[in-house]
Amino acid sequence: MVFYIFLFVFGALIGSFLNVCIYRIPRGRSIIWPSSRCPSCNNPIRAYDNIPVISYIFLLRGRCRYCKERISMRYPLVEALNACSYLLVFWRFGFGWSSAIYCVLCSALIVITFIDIDFQIIPDRITLPGIPIGIAAGSFLLPDPFLRATALGYKAALIGAASGFAFFYMVAFLSIALLKKEGMGGGDVKMMAMVGGFLGWKGVILTTFLGSLSGSVIGIGLIAFRGREKGSLIPFGPFLALGAIVSLFFGQEILMWYLY
């Protein structure tokens, strides 16, 4: 129990850093310097006002201490989401290097999700390092998410990264060649190469299917209930991230359900 409490606190602290990444990376700013500041008045945030989740709810009550401008609920949401993802990873996969690596993957997917929602981009600063890290981890440290008693191995990791890149690159190329418009961004292509390295080629297939399914449902819902125009851009990265998370946690169960 003590370990899980520590893990939640650690995940929330990392989540606070993820908020910095989400805000600064797409704006081309350093994620190290300067210290955290209010986005409205630019005053530095005091250390005791920067305690994940707790400061937002009990000390600041959702507003800046100085200018009293409302602070987005996204900040404690990201902190809590990252903390919960760490708990779920260690509960699901136990103690070991694989769980630590999956925590890194979950954090990367959280950052990708919120940046893509705001800016419709998936930064290379996350995906390009993530591709070799995923391949290396998949080759030597990670189990196959669909057959957890079996190691993923370098062949599955390499094929996963290559297939994720190739399939989404083909979709992007054909969209421009046939439809004369961008149907898939370069960030999505590199993201799926990264996911393939961590999850293997079966993970690419299931992630793509689940991402497309959830994206279609949400897109149709936005058109039907919120009047969003048909053909308007909806970021695909969050749906791919959701598909990757589901594939990671439930890939084996989904495969067994499909086969039997």
Image: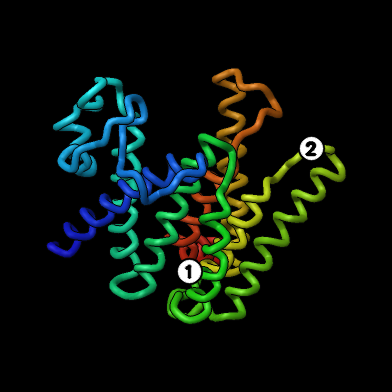
What is the quadrant of residue 162 in the picture?
bottom right
How far from the left and from the top, in percent, is residue 252?
A: 48, 66
Q: Residue at x 73, y 55 (%)?
A: 169
Mark drawn on residue 201: none
- Towards the viewer: 259 or 69: 69
Mark drawn on residue 181: 2
Residue lying farthest to the top in this orientation? 227
- Towards the viewer: 234 or 148: 234
User: Mark 1 Cα within 10 Å, few/some/many (few <14, many 20+)?
Assistant: many
Residue lying farthest to the front in this orientation? 34
Residue 210 seen by the camera: yes
Judge left or right: residue 217 versus residue 171.
Answer: left
**Residue identifier under label 1:** 145
Q: Residue at x 86, y 45 (%)?
A: 177
- Towards the viewer: 251 or 75: 75
How far from the left and from the top, in percent, is residue 208?
A: 62, 53
Element marked by disc 1: loop
What is the quadrant of residue 201 in the picture?
bottom right
Element marked by disc 2: loop
